[in-house]
Amino acid sequence: MKELIEFLAKNIVENPDSVGVTQDEQNGLKVVKLVVHPDDMGRIIGREGKIIKAVRSLVKIKSLKENRKIFLELVPVEGSPNHS
């Protein structure tokens, strides 16, 4: 899952070196955090959220195959000037 999300994000953003993906388990729910550069937030979200919705749809399909609940969270890189 992590590799899929990282591959998709790195091919969408302008700062692929800033892309990071982490996984955490909380109450049986797998939370995958996609970290991107603040300048790339608009690119990864897309117009009216179409790109992030498409990525989440792929995550949902893969999670159904794995019979797990997975939530994708999008966060900007910490410590950047635009991050609060």
Image (cartoon, rainbow, N blue to C red):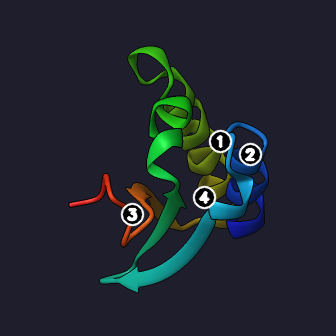
- Amino acid type shown at disc 2: Leu
Residue at left 68%, top 68%?
2
Q: Position of residue 39 (x, y in %)?
A: 49, 41
- Amino acid type shown at disc 1: Leu
Query: Badges 2 and 1: C-beta atoms under 8 Å apart?
Result: yes
- Amino acid type shown at disc 3: Ser
Query: Badges 3 and 2: C-beta atoms under 8 Å apart?
Result: no
Marks 2 and 1, how far apart at CA = 10 Å
Marks 3 and 4, how far apart at CA = 31 Å
Does 39 sit above or below residue 66?
above
Which residue is label 4 attached to? 63
Camera-side mark, 3 or 4: 3
Q: Position of residue 9 (x, y in %)?
A: 68, 47
Q: Residues within 10 Å of mark 4 (few under 14, many from 20)?
A: some
Q: Give the quadrant of the N terminus.
A: bottom right
Residue at left 38%, top 70%?
78
Which residue is label 2 attached to? 8
Q: Residues within 10 Å of mark 2 (few under 14, many from 20)?
A: few
Which residue is label 1 attached to? 58
Query: Badges 1 and 4: C-beta atoms under 8 Å apart?
Result: no
Which residue is label 3 attached to? 80
Q: Earlier in the sequence, mark 3 or mark 4?
A: 4
Q: Position of residue 65 (x, y in %)?
A: 69, 57
For mark 2, give the secondary structure.
helix
Q: Earlier in the sequence, mark 3 or mark 2?
A: 2
- Amino acid type shown at disc 4: Ser
Marks 3 and 2, how far apart at CA = 22 Å
Residue at left 77%, top 65%?
3
Marks 3 and 1, how far apart at CA = 29 Å
Camera-side mark, 2 or 1: 2
For mark 3, give the secondary structure.
loop
Marks 1 and 4, how far apart at CA = 8 Å
